[in-house]
Image (cartoon, rainbow, N blue to C red):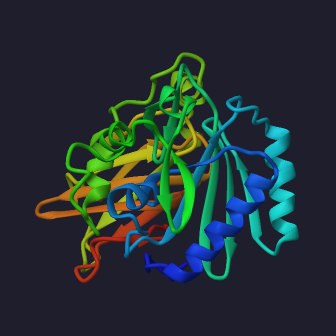
Amino acid sequence: MQASVFQAMDLSAAEAVLKEVKQILDDRGLIFFLRHGTCLGAVRDHAFIGWDDDVDTGSIIGMHGLTEEMIYATAEVFRQNDFDVEVIDSELHLSVDMKKSGIQFDWTCYRIIGDHIYQWPAVKIPVRLYETPAEVDFLGETFHVPNPPEEYFELKYGPDWRTPKQTGFEREVLALMPDGPLPRKGGIMARLSAMLPWHRAGGLRVLDQDGRPIEGANVGVAPTTVLSGIERSVTDASGFTKFLLPEQALYVLEIKYGNHEEILYMETLAPGINYVYKADPENSDGRYNVLVPE
């Protein structure tokens, strides 16, 4: 698969799709909220962020009467309304990934873990922000957002959330995640790390723009579907390092060496496979599907 760069969505199409999703969820009596960049744009800018590439909404399983059965049933309603739908079940959430009219739309239904939910990649957000959500006027409609939204933005994006950033925000999000794999006893990462099953590991070879291996590159890997911090490692003389991959899923990677730094915000990785990263001097921000099997 060839590496790609995130492209801004069509804002008119995004508005139409968001309003259609809202109508379907409202008709079924399901409470949902804006999240991530969609929420930030609605509150801060009173509009979609011009360079955003998808629409993000969420709900919380067990809150406001939401059950897993309701989520699956609603996913089927979206299919009947000509959405392409995939439901992804993980430790942290049930994610309903949809596409219509060229717009990528995410309705992520979070699982409560110790009075918190964990938003992409795995940033800890208190459930209390959603118990009595705030309301915001957006696109001529009323939408729910965390309450207070300012606290949510600081937790999700850091203290500089009021400054619009097309690139670089990913680094600030990763900086809010702890290092290390074991924040919760009995979680998937706890069980896997205790056994250290290297057949469940993945590997990465870091190459510069000319294809030469980089020794001493710092690699951070953050799962997005299990409760974990960032696992960090350093490449050897052949540019290679290993890390634990609990399951095939989307991961966020941070790769740094010398003056080079790149955040890969959406890479599909699977256990037992070694991947290759090659730097691209013309595109060091916003790339995805960058890693290829070795």
Residue found 51% across the figure and 27% down from its top: 193
* Residue toward you, 188 or 23: 23
| Residue 62 in picture, x, y percent from top left | 71, 29
Residue 85, visible in the rendered structure: yes
Q: In terms of image quadrants, where is residue 278?
A: bottom left
* Residue toward you, 165 or 289: 165
Question: Seen in the image, is 45 located left or right of residue 109?
Answer: left
* Residue toward you, 167 or 221: 167
| Residue 147 in picture, x, y percent from top left | 45, 36
Quarter of the image for the N terminus: give it. Answer: bottom right
- In this view, 48 is above or below 5: above
Give the farthest residue toward the top. 185
Give the farthest residue toward the left. 259
- In this view, 224 is above or below 14: above
Q: In terms of image quadrants, where is residue 101?
A: bottom right
| Residue 220 in picture, x, y percent from top left | 33, 47
Question: Seen in the image, is 231 located left or right of residue 237?
Answer: right
| Residue 289 in picture, x, y percent from top left | 49, 71
- In this view, 198 is above or below 116: below
Residue found 25% across the figure and 83% down from its top: 282
Residue found 32% across the figure and 56% down from its top: 170
Question: Seen in the image, is 191 located left or right of residue 292?
Answer: right
Exactly how many numbered labels are in the figure? Answer: 0
Residue 272, visible in the rendered structure: no
